[in-house]
Image (cartoon, rainbow, N blue to C red):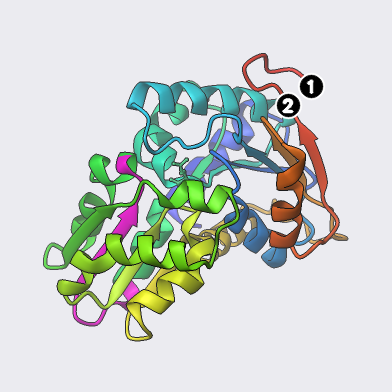
Protein backbone atom coordinates (compact mmCIF):
# COMPACT_ATOMS: atom_id res chain seq x y z
CA UNK A 1 0.00 0.00 0.00
CA UNK A 2 1.33 3.49 -0.88
CA UNK A 3 2.42 5.75 1.97
CA UNK A 4 -0.37 8.33 1.55
CA UNK A 5 -3.01 5.60 1.24
CA UNK A 6 -1.80 4.07 4.52
CA UNK A 7 -1.85 7.48 6.16
CA UNK A 8 -5.38 8.23 4.94
CA UNK A 9 -6.54 4.78 5.96
CA UNK A 10 -5.35 5.34 9.49
CA UNK A 11 -7.23 8.69 9.60
CA UNK A 12 -10.38 6.87 8.46
CA UNK A 13 -9.98 4.11 11.02
CA UNK A 14 -9.05 6.26 13.97
CA UNK A 15 -12.26 7.99 14.95
CA UNK A 16 -15.01 6.87 12.62
CA UNK A 17 -16.78 3.68 11.86
CA UNK A 18 -16.84 3.19 8.10
CA UNK A 19 -17.73 0.33 5.85
CA UNK A 20 -17.95 -0.05 2.11
CA UNK A 21 -21.62 1.05 2.12
CA UNK A 22 -20.65 4.52 3.39
CA UNK A 23 -21.15 7.15 0.66
CA UNK A 24 -18.66 9.12 -1.42
CA UNK A 25 -19.25 12.88 -1.12
CA UNK A 26 -18.46 15.33 -3.93
CA UNK A 27 -18.91 19.06 -4.14
CA UNK A 28 -18.50 22.05 -6.42
CA UNK A 29 -19.71 25.63 -6.68
CA UNK A 30 -22.37 24.56 -9.18
CA UNK A 31 -22.98 21.94 -11.87
CA UNK A 32 -19.33 21.68 -13.02
CA UNK A 33 -18.43 19.01 -10.46
CA UNK A 34 -21.08 16.80 -12.04
CA UNK A 35 -18.47 16.08 -14.73
CA UNK A 36 -16.44 14.34 -11.99
CA UNK A 37 -19.51 12.77 -10.32
CA UNK A 38 -20.73 11.34 -13.63
CA UNK A 39 -17.35 9.76 -14.41
CA UNK A 40 -17.14 8.36 -10.90
CA UNK A 41 -20.62 6.89 -11.22
CA UNK A 42 -19.68 5.16 -14.47
CA UNK A 43 -16.41 3.79 -13.00
CA UNK A 44 -17.92 2.85 -9.62
CA UNK A 45 -21.67 2.32 -10.07
CA UNK A 46 -21.99 0.59 -6.67
CA UNK A 47 -20.90 3.69 -4.76
CA UNK A 48 -23.55 5.89 -3.21
CA UNK A 49 -22.68 9.37 -4.49
CA UNK A 50 -23.81 12.39 -2.49
CA UNK A 51 -23.22 15.54 -4.55
CA UNK A 52 -23.53 19.13 -3.46
CA UNK A 53 -23.56 22.05 -5.95
CA UNK A 54 -23.67 25.57 -4.55
CA UNK A 55 -25.86 26.92 -7.37
CA UNK A 56 -27.17 29.76 -5.17
CA UNK A 57 -23.66 31.26 -4.83
CA UNK A 58 -21.85 30.23 -8.03
CA UNK A 59 -19.36 31.42 -9.32
CA UNK A 60 -16.64 30.97 -6.70
CA UNK A 61 -13.68 31.68 -8.95
CA UNK A 62 -14.21 35.44 -8.96
CA UNK A 63 -14.50 35.65 -5.16
CA UNK A 64 -11.88 36.26 -2.45
CA UNK A 65 -9.93 33.52 -0.65
CA UNK A 66 -11.81 34.17 2.57
CA UNK A 67 -15.23 33.76 0.97
CA UNK A 68 -14.19 30.64 -0.95
CA UNK A 69 -12.90 29.04 2.27
CA UNK A 70 -15.98 30.09 4.20
CA UNK A 71 -18.31 28.55 1.60
CA UNK A 72 -16.20 25.38 1.39
CA UNK A 73 -16.34 25.02 5.18
CA UNK A 74 -20.13 25.31 5.18
CA UNK A 75 -20.36 22.64 2.48
CA UNK A 76 -17.95 20.28 4.25
CA UNK A 77 -19.93 20.72 7.49
CA UNK A 78 -23.02 19.60 5.59
CA UNK A 79 -21.33 16.65 3.87
CA UNK A 80 -19.57 15.20 6.93
CA UNK A 81 -23.01 14.44 8.43
CA UNK A 82 -23.33 11.66 5.85
CA UNK A 83 -20.16 10.06 7.27
CA UNK A 84 -18.56 9.73 3.81
CA UNK A 85 -15.57 7.49 3.05
CA UNK A 86 -13.98 10.41 1.23
CA UNK A 87 -14.85 13.95 0.19
CA UNK A 88 -13.91 14.93 -3.36
CA UNK A 89 -13.35 18.63 -3.93
CA UNK A 90 -14.59 18.69 -7.53
CA UNK A 91 -13.69 22.35 -7.88
CA UNK A 92 -10.27 23.61 -8.92
CA UNK A 93 -10.81 26.94 -7.16
CA UNK A 94 -11.46 25.28 -3.77
CA UNK A 95 -8.77 22.66 -4.47
CA UNK A 96 -6.28 25.51 -5.05
CA UNK A 97 -7.20 27.67 -2.07
CA UNK A 98 -8.97 25.50 0.45
CA UNK A 99 -7.79 21.89 0.51
CA UNK A 100 -5.28 22.17 3.36
CA UNK A 101 -7.64 24.49 5.22
CA UNK A 102 -10.42 21.86 5.03
CA UNK A 103 -8.00 19.07 6.01
CA UNK A 104 -7.04 20.94 9.16
CA UNK A 105 -10.63 21.79 10.02
CA UNK A 106 -12.06 18.32 9.30
CA UNK A 107 -9.08 16.23 10.29
CA UNK A 108 -11.04 12.94 10.59
CA UNK A 109 -11.89 13.04 6.89
CA UNK A 110 -9.95 12.22 3.75
CA UNK A 111 -10.13 14.79 0.94
CA UNK A 112 -9.34 14.33 -2.74
CA UNK A 113 -8.74 17.29 -5.02
CA UNK A 114 -8.84 17.64 -8.80
CA UNK A 115 -5.47 19.32 -9.29
CA UNK A 116 -3.05 16.49 -8.50
CA UNK A 117 -4.65 14.03 -10.97
CA UNK A 118 -4.78 16.72 -13.72
CA UNK A 119 -1.13 17.66 -13.17
CA UNK A 120 0.01 14.03 -13.47
CA UNK A 121 -2.06 13.52 -16.61
CA UNK A 122 -0.76 16.74 -18.25
CA UNK A 123 2.85 15.76 -17.56
CA UNK A 124 2.19 12.27 -18.91
CA UNK A 125 0.73 13.47 -22.24
CA UNK A 126 2.84 16.53 -23.17
CA UNK A 127 5.48 15.89 -25.82
CA UNK A 128 6.88 19.38 -26.42
CA UNK A 129 6.68 20.19 -22.67
CA UNK A 130 4.59 23.33 -23.16
CA UNK A 131 1.39 23.15 -21.15
CA UNK A 132 -1.47 25.66 -21.12
CA UNK A 133 -3.79 26.03 -18.13
CA UNK A 134 -7.21 27.68 -18.21
CA UNK A 135 -9.16 28.23 -15.01
CA UNK A 136 -11.05 30.70 -12.88
CA UNK A 137 -9.32 33.91 -11.72
CA UNK A 138 -8.93 32.33 -8.23
CA UNK A 139 -7.24 29.18 -9.54
CA UNK A 140 -4.92 31.06 -11.89
CA UNK A 141 -3.96 33.67 -9.25
CA UNK A 142 -3.17 30.90 -6.74
CA UNK A 143 -0.44 29.56 -9.08
CA UNK A 144 -1.33 26.06 -7.92
CA UNK A 145 -0.82 24.52 -11.36
CA UNK A 146 2.62 25.95 -12.22
CA UNK A 147 3.81 25.17 -8.67
CA UNK A 148 2.61 21.56 -8.79
CA UNK A 149 3.90 20.94 -12.32
CA UNK A 150 7.33 22.38 -11.47
CA UNK A 151 7.54 20.07 -8.45
CA UNK A 152 7.57 17.15 -10.87
CA UNK A 153 9.51 18.72 -13.72
CA UNK A 154 11.27 22.10 -13.54
CA UNK A 155 11.81 22.22 -17.30
CA UNK A 156 8.17 22.22 -18.39
CA UNK A 157 6.88 25.60 -19.55
CA UNK A 158 3.48 26.53 -18.17
CA UNK A 159 1.24 29.27 -19.58
CA UNK A 160 -1.96 30.29 -17.81
CA UNK A 161 -5.11 32.21 -18.61
CA UNK A 162 -8.06 33.13 -16.39
CA UNK A 163 -11.43 32.75 -18.17
CA UNK A 164 -14.07 34.30 -15.88
CA UNK A 165 -16.92 34.27 -18.43
CA UNK A 166 -16.89 30.51 -19.04
CA UNK A 167 -18.53 29.36 -15.78
CA UNK A 168 -21.69 31.50 -16.25
CA UNK A 169 -22.00 30.17 -19.83
CA UNK A 170 -21.94 26.60 -18.53
CA UNK A 171 -24.39 27.28 -15.71
CA UNK A 172 -26.82 28.60 -18.34
CA UNK A 173 -26.31 25.56 -20.58
CA UNK A 174 -24.59 27.49 -23.41
CA UNK A 175 -22.22 24.63 -24.12
CA UNK A 176 -21.72 24.92 -27.86
CA UNK A 177 -23.01 28.19 -29.32
CA UNK A 178 -21.32 30.68 -31.67
CA UNK A 179 -21.05 33.16 -28.80
CA UNK A 180 -19.37 30.54 -26.59
CA UNK A 181 -16.85 29.73 -29.36
CA UNK A 182 -16.05 33.42 -29.82
CA UNK A 183 -15.42 33.89 -26.08
CA UNK A 184 -13.28 30.75 -25.96
CA UNK A 185 -11.27 32.05 -28.95
CA UNK A 186 -10.73 35.38 -27.17
CA UNK A 187 -9.33 33.62 -24.09
CA UNK A 188 -7.21 31.01 -25.89
CA UNK A 189 -5.53 33.10 -28.55
CA UNK A 190 -2.48 33.98 -26.40
CA UNK A 191 -1.97 30.39 -25.26
CA UNK A 192 -2.10 29.07 -28.82
CA UNK A 193 0.60 31.57 -29.81
CA UNK A 194 2.81 29.80 -27.25
CA UNK A 195 2.68 26.54 -29.22
CA UNK A 196 1.23 24.47 -26.36
CA UNK A 197 0.48 20.80 -27.13
CA UNK A 198 -1.54 20.21 -23.93
CA UNK A 199 -4.32 22.28 -22.40
CA UNK A 200 -5.54 21.59 -18.87
CA UNK A 201 -9.23 22.32 -18.35
CA UNK A 202 -8.52 23.72 -14.89
CA UNK A 203 -12.15 24.17 -13.90
CA UNK A 204 -14.65 21.33 -13.65
CA UNK A 205 -17.19 23.36 -15.62
CA UNK A 206 -14.99 23.46 -18.73
CA UNK A 207 -15.34 19.83 -19.90
CA UNK A 208 -18.93 20.80 -20.72
CA UNK A 209 -17.48 23.26 -23.26
CA UNK A 210 -15.20 20.65 -24.84
CA UNK A 211 -16.82 20.89 -28.28
CA UNK A 212 -16.33 24.67 -28.43
CA UNK A 213 -12.78 24.42 -27.08
CA UNK A 214 -11.86 21.69 -29.57
CA UNK A 215 -13.14 23.85 -32.44
CA UNK A 216 -10.69 26.58 -31.40
CA UNK A 217 -7.59 24.57 -30.43
CA UNK A 218 -7.85 21.87 -33.12
CA UNK A 219 -6.94 18.22 -32.82
CA UNK A 220 -3.20 18.69 -32.20
CA UNK A 221 -3.73 20.03 -28.65
CA UNK A 222 -4.48 17.39 -26.02
CA UNK A 223 -7.23 18.43 -23.56
CA UNK A 224 -6.79 17.29 -19.95
CA UNK A 225 -10.08 16.82 -18.10
CA UNK A 226 -9.82 16.11 -14.34
CA UNK A 227 -12.81 13.78 -14.23
CA UNK A 228 -11.18 10.68 -15.66
CA UNK A 229 -7.92 10.93 -13.73
CA UNK A 230 -9.75 11.77 -10.48
CA UNK A 231 -12.18 8.89 -10.96
CA UNK A 232 -9.31 6.43 -11.46
CA UNK A 233 -7.40 7.74 -8.43
CA UNK A 234 -10.53 7.34 -6.26
CA UNK A 235 -11.13 3.82 -7.56
CA UNK A 236 -7.54 2.84 -6.75
CA UNK A 237 -7.83 4.31 -3.25
CA UNK A 238 -11.10 2.55 -2.43
CA UNK A 239 -9.73 -0.74 -3.76
CA UNK A 240 -6.48 -0.43 -1.76
CA UNK A 241 -8.34 0.41 1.45
CA UNK A 242 -10.93 -2.37 1.00
CA UNK A 243 -13.73 0.25 0.98
CA UNK A 244 -14.93 -0.30 -2.59
CA UNK A 245 -18.64 -1.03 -2.89
CA UNK A 246 -19.17 -3.20 -5.93
CA UNK A 247 -22.76 -4.14 -5.17
CA UNK A 248 -25.82 -3.07 -7.19
CA UNK A 249 -25.90 0.47 -8.78
CA UNK A 250 -27.29 3.29 -6.66
CA UNK A 251 -28.89 6.47 -8.01
CA UNK A 252 -26.75 9.50 -7.14
CA UNK A 253 -28.30 12.01 -4.74
CA UNK A 254 -27.70 15.58 -5.88
CA UNK A 255 -28.16 18.47 -3.46
CA UNK A 256 -28.24 22.06 -4.69
CA UNK A 257 -28.44 25.29 -2.73
CA UNK A 258 -30.83 26.61 -5.36
CA UNK A 259 -32.69 24.95 -8.16
CA UNK A 260 -34.78 27.15 -10.43
CA UNK A 261 -37.15 24.93 -12.43
CA UNK A 262 -35.73 26.03 -15.82
CA UNK A 263 -32.39 24.50 -14.91
CA UNK A 264 -33.75 20.99 -14.27
CA UNK A 265 -33.59 20.28 -18.02
CA UNK A 266 -29.93 21.34 -18.25
CA UNK A 267 -29.15 18.97 -15.40
CA UNK A 268 -31.10 16.00 -16.68
CA UNK A 269 -29.74 16.36 -20.25
CA UNK A 270 -26.28 16.43 -18.83
CA UNK A 271 -26.75 13.14 -16.96
CA UNK A 272 -28.48 11.56 -19.98
CA UNK A 273 -31.76 11.43 -18.09
CA UNK A 274 -30.58 8.58 -15.89
CA UNK A 275 -32.24 8.05 -12.53
CA UNK A 276 -31.24 10.85 -10.16
CA UNK A 277 -32.51 12.08 -6.81
CA UNK A 278 -32.45 15.90 -6.72
CA UNK A 279 -32.90 17.84 -3.48
CA UNK A 280 -32.58 21.44 -2.38
CA UNK A 281 -30.79 22.40 0.82
CA UNK A 282 -30.25 25.67 2.65
CA UNK A 283 -26.49 25.43 3.07
CA UNK A 284 -26.20 28.55 5.23
CA UNK A 285 -28.55 27.05 7.82
CA UNK A 286 -27.11 23.56 7.28
CA UNK A 287 -30.50 21.93 7.61
CA UNK A 288 -32.29 19.12 5.80
CA UNK A 289 -30.00 16.17 6.63
N1 LIG B 1 -16.05 24.44 -11.10
C1 LIG B 1 -15.23 25.22 -10.28
C2 LIG B 1 -13.77 25.08 -10.53
O1 LIG B 1 -13.38 24.03 -10.92
C3 LIG B 1 -15.68 26.57 -9.86
C4 LIG B 1 -16.00 27.56 -10.85
C5 LIG B 1 -16.59 28.83 -10.23
O2 LIG B 1 -17.53 28.70 -9.45
O3 LIG B 1 -16.08 29.91 -10.52
O4 LIG B 1 -12.99 25.97 -10.30
Q: Nearer the viewer, residue 2 or 27?
A: 27
Describe the element under mark 2 as helix, strand or loop.
loop
Residue 288 circle label: 1
Describe the element under mark 1 as helix, strand or loop.
loop
Magenta stretch? 124-137
Which residue does the image show at 36% across and 21% down from the upper left?
Answer: 66
Q: Are marks 2 and 1 in contact (CB under 8 Å)?
A: yes
Q: Is residue 207 above or below residue 138?
A: below
Q: Is residue 173 left or right of residue 206?
A: right
Residue 239 position by quadrant = bottom right
Query: Percent x, y for residue 229?
Result: 49, 64
Q: Is residue 49 visible?
A: no
Q: Nearer the viewer, residue 280 or 25?
A: 280
Which residue does the image show at 50% across and 28% down from the upper left?
Answer: 72
Q: Quadrant of the C terminus?
A: top right
Residue assigned mark 2: 281
Residue 56 circle label: none
Q: Is residue 140 left or right of residue 234?
A: left
Query: Percent x, y for residue 88?
Result: 56, 44
How many angstroms separate mark 2 from mark 1 (CA)?
A: 6 Å
Query: Percent x, y for residue 193?
Result: 16, 73
Amino acid sequence: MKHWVKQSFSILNQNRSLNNKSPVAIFDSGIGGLTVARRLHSLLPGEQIIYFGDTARVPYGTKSHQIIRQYATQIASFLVKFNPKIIIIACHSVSSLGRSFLERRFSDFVFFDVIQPSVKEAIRVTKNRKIGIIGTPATIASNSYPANIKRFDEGIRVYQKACPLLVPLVEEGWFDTDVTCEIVRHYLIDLLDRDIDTLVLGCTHYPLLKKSIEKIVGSSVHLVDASDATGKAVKEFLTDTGLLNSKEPKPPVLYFSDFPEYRRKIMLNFWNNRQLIIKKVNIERRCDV
